[in-house]
Image: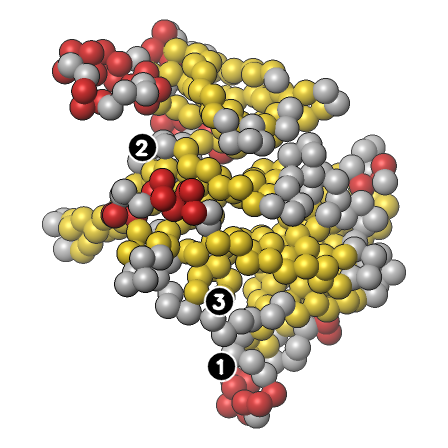
């Protein structure tokens, strides 16, 4: 088990002529133990393959999730009954070269929207994501496929609609949902942002609702799509049950948050102002108070425990820094470095920079 502390140097090619991928496995002293390779003979001839995700388990098995479809050329020569229009498959590769294929069933009334492989901290392997129904009007919920690592088969397959409490909470905002004739609500424009693993073996799927505005650019005589990101939809799965929570963000900046696990809680950092932390409606504040709060830019964290209890704290008042703030360093997901160690978590964020100095922030949990 100690041999799998580091896995690096993933190299892959996927195209109409086949696929090649290689992992080099090294130990904590950077000694190469072996390379695990698979070549185009594990894929169907004449098919295009597209990798979705991959993980390793503690025994060194590689799990590769991918879709495949016939190439335009092969469609002309193959009998249509020889292939499905698109196939979704999980490949398990053993160190000794053994390959196991697990096709993932496509249902007539439901289909996968977003997919991701998850290896929990207690070493269960899942395929997770969002699904839509045949009416194709928005995301209906999450699906969880759990694998049996010993028998290399599907252990369970669950379709988990968003909870009634969550949908009732969101029903007041008609802009974010389709309201069908049967009064069933679906979330549309839901972006699958991340999955965070927790200490007890559970994990949280993080989705973010967004809106798209098409703006006309007179200089290029064309339209440009602008994306506005809003509330987070948090879905924590604890081996048997899924719990859904909503966190109001009212943000419009992509890369505005960095998510991680700390002491079995979901934690995420945001850049914002003191106005973002107010429980009261901004419209109820006086113009002077609102303006004063908007000027006070801060780093704040949101902690969500396994029961959905939410706590927000100000970590640092950026307005007090003497250095010039650079926009690119405000993107937390590209400038944060997380170190998990026994008993805690340490996060380092390179968040400010100018010609004379840089400023780093270290947060310990």
Cβ atoms at labels 1 and 3 below 8 Å apart: no
Which residue is painted at 71% across and 62% down in the image?
Answer: 154
Q: Nearer the viewer, mark 3 or mark 2?
A: 3
Residue at 31% across / 45% down in the picture?
171
**Furthest residue toward left:** 218
| Residue 291 in view (yes/no) | no
Q: For mark 2, does the 10 Å Cα neighbourhood hold few (<14), some (14 to 19), or many (20 or more) residues? A: few
User: Where is residue 6, by image quadrant?
Assistant: top right
Q: Secondary structure at mark 3?
A: strand
Q: Where is residue 238 drawn, in percent x and y?
A: 64, 42
- Cα–Cα span, label 3 and label 2: 31 Å
Depth order, front residue of 250/247: 247
Q: Secondary structure at mark 2?
A: loop
Q: Which residue is mark 1?
A: 72
Vertical relation: 177 (above or below) 355? below
Q: Disc 1 on helix, strand or loop?
A: helix
Residue 250: mark: 2
């Amino acid at each position: 088990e100690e041999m799998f502390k580091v896995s690096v140097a993933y190299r892959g090619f996927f195209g109409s002529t086949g696929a090649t991928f290689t992992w080099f496995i090294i130990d904590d002293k950077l000694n190469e133990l072996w390379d695990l390779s698979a070549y185009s003979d594990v894929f169907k001839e004449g098919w295009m393959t597209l990798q979705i995700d991959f993980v390793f388990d503690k025994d060194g098995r590689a799990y590769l999730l991918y879709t495949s479809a016939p190439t335009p050329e092969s469609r002309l020569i193959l009998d249509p009954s020889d292939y499905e229009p698109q196939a979704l498959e999980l490949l398990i590769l053993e160190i000794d070269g053994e390959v196991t294929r697990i096709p993932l069933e496509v249902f007539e009334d439901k289909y996968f929207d977003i997919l991701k492989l998850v290896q929990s901290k207690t070493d269960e392997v899942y395929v997770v994501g969002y699904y839509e129904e045949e009416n194709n009007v928005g995301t209906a919920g999450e699906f969880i496929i759990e694998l049996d690592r010993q028998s290399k088969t599907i252990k369970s397959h669950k379709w988990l609609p968003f909870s009634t409490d969550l949908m009732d909470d969101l029903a007041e905002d008609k802009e974010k949902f389709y309201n069908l004739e049967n009064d069933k609500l679906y979330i549309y424009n839901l972006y699958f942002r991340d999955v965070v693993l927790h200490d007890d073996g559970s994990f949280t799927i993080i989705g973010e609702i967004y809106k798209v505005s098409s703006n006309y650019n007179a200089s290029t005589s064309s339209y440009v799509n602008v994306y506005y990101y809003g509330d987070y939809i948090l879905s924590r799965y604890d081996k048997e049950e899924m719990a859904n929570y909503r966190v109001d963000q009212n943000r419009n900046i992509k890369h505005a948050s960095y998510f991680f696990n700390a002491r079995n809680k979901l934690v995420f950092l945001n850049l914002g102002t003191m106005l973002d932390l107010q429980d009261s409606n901004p419209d109820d504040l006086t113009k002077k108070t609102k303006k004063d709060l908007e000027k006070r830019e801060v780093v704040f964290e949101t902690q969500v425990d396994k029961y959905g209890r939410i706590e927000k704290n100000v970590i640092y008042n950026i307005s007090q820094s003497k250095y010039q703030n650079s926009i690119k360093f405000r993107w937390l997901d590209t400038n944060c470095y997380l170190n998990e160690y026994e008993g805690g978590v340490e996060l380092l964020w390179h968040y400010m920079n100018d010609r004379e100095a840089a400023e780093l922030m270290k947060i310990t949990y």
